[in-house]
Amino acid sequence: MKKVFASASLIALFSGGAAFAQECTDPVPITWSTIAGFYTDAMASFVKSFEEKNCAKVTVVNIDNSQLYNKQVIEMVGQTGAYDVVTLETAEKAEFAENGFILPMTDFFKDKQDLLNDVSPTLRAMTVEYKGNVWGLPYYTYSAGMFIRQDLFDDPTEQAAFKAKYGYDLAPPTTWEQHRDQAEFFTRKKGDLLKGQPLEKDFYGVGLMAGPFPEIQDEMSAMIWGMGSDWLNADGKVPVDDVEKAMNEYLALMPFAPPAALTVTYDGVMNQMKDCQIAMTAGFFLDQWPNAVKTEESCPGAKMAAIEAPLKKAYVGGFLLAVSSSSANPDMAMKFVAHIGGPEIQKQFAELGGASTLTSVLTDPEFATPEKRATNGQYATLNQVFDSMAGFSSNLFKTPFGAKIYNTMQIPLQSAASGQITARQAAEQLAADVEKICGGPCPIAN
């Protein structure tokens, strides 16, 4: 990282950026509220070039992800102007736009269509488009595919045993029925053989994010979207039968996941993978590839692969940078959004292992080399996900109640995952909760 930052400083120096900064006597202040952690740390390091080019002073406010939504809503409702640029999860976009918390950037992008078009139409539809307007740019994507231990799928002994038991070839799953078979097949006890070698500890077919966190619904989105349904139908209601079916598909995997599945989210699943405990994930965030690939270092003979989820449907989303309607400097704030979401910074972000939102970066041959596999080996799969889901958009992200629904969904889903209620009861509870949140059928923007 130091090398990247040093290079950026040299570029600014020789391009006249430093000279411009010296002439800047009254920089325009911009405050950006965003998520504490790697992605923010990486992006915060790139604000210097923006400050030098635009005579601005950017203050980055790092907020824990669990508190970000509530803190931003408080400031937006109060129109305090505390934040010029806000960071929104996919489900929050419609609420912030509908309530006038953020400014449309459609006019801003009229002469910047190349930048906007560089974001996959699938990702644009999910993250930045609402009611015919563009509301900013995504600055990284956590869109999902799936991680597998490719070495297990390629092992001749395992292939023969699987074919003998299930009657078809062992290969990356294309349906959730195949995924369930493989999860069952790879679940072994300590002392059992895996690739012909005795296991030193129990091994499980799949890692699941069934802990007390929102990611369980991201995981299950692959299942409900894969069946051609959605969390909300066109009438703004929860399709109870479909949610029950997706919940049952999820419950069918629970016996083949580590017991800790009920306590973990994505980082716990990645720890299980690197600890040689699991064979694959379900629908899983592809931005975690730099963590997943470390399994090859910790598990002898392991070979990781990033693939599309079964039925080529999985959660698509990203964090959106949008401009607060109470910003004292909206023009400069919009320039900042375009800077962070633009090709120069996105490429630097990719060099650090970030999941870029731009097609030009995801398809750049530079990131397809063997040398870049450890940091960018998921890029080709990300592009496949966006292509496979072209034209798709979830109603959950087209209602102004999406964020409140999203923050409620985990309760009935996790209750079913832990065996406290049935799949049917979870679906009915979710339907009742959503109807209460929306005061009836939820409004869906077309």
Image (spheres, helix red, strand yellow):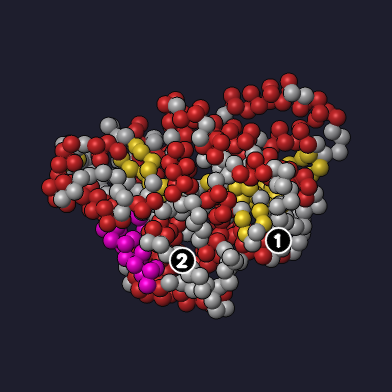
The amino acid type found where label 1 is placed reads Phe
Image position, residue 127 (x, y; %): 58, 53
Q: Which residue is mark 2?
A: 231
Image position, residue 166 (x, y; %): 17, 52
Q: Quadrant of residue 303?
A: top left
Q: Is residue 245 left or right of residue 404?
A: left
Q: Earlier in the sequence, mark 1 or mark 2?
A: 1
The amino acid type found where label 2 is placed reads Trp
Q: Secondary structure at mark 2?
A: loop
Q: Is 195 in front, or is 235?
A: 235
Q: Which residues are magenta?
A: 241-262
Q: Is residue 353 visible?
A: no
Q: Is 109 in front, or is 10?
A: 109
Answer few, some or many: residues within 10 Å of disc 2's Cα (few below 14, many 20 plus, some between 14 and 19).
Answer: many
Label 1, label 2: how many angstroms apart (C-alpha)? 25 Å
Q: Is residue 310 visible?
A: yes
Give above or below for 49 relative to 164: above
**Residue at the location (49% across, 73% down)?**
237
**Residue at the location (65% across, 40% down)?**
114
**Mark toward the viewer: 1 or 2:** 2
Q: Is 255 in front, or is 380?
A: 380
Give above or below for 204 relative to 249: above
The answer to if 247 sits in the magenta stretch is: yes
Give above or below for 414 relative to 165: below
Q: Quadrant of residue 212?
A: bottom left
Q: Main secondary structure of the magenta part?
A: helix
**Residue at the location (61% across, 44% down)?**
117
Q: Is residue 150 left or right of residue 318?
A: left
Residue most extreme to the bottom: 440
Which disc number belongs to residue 101? 1
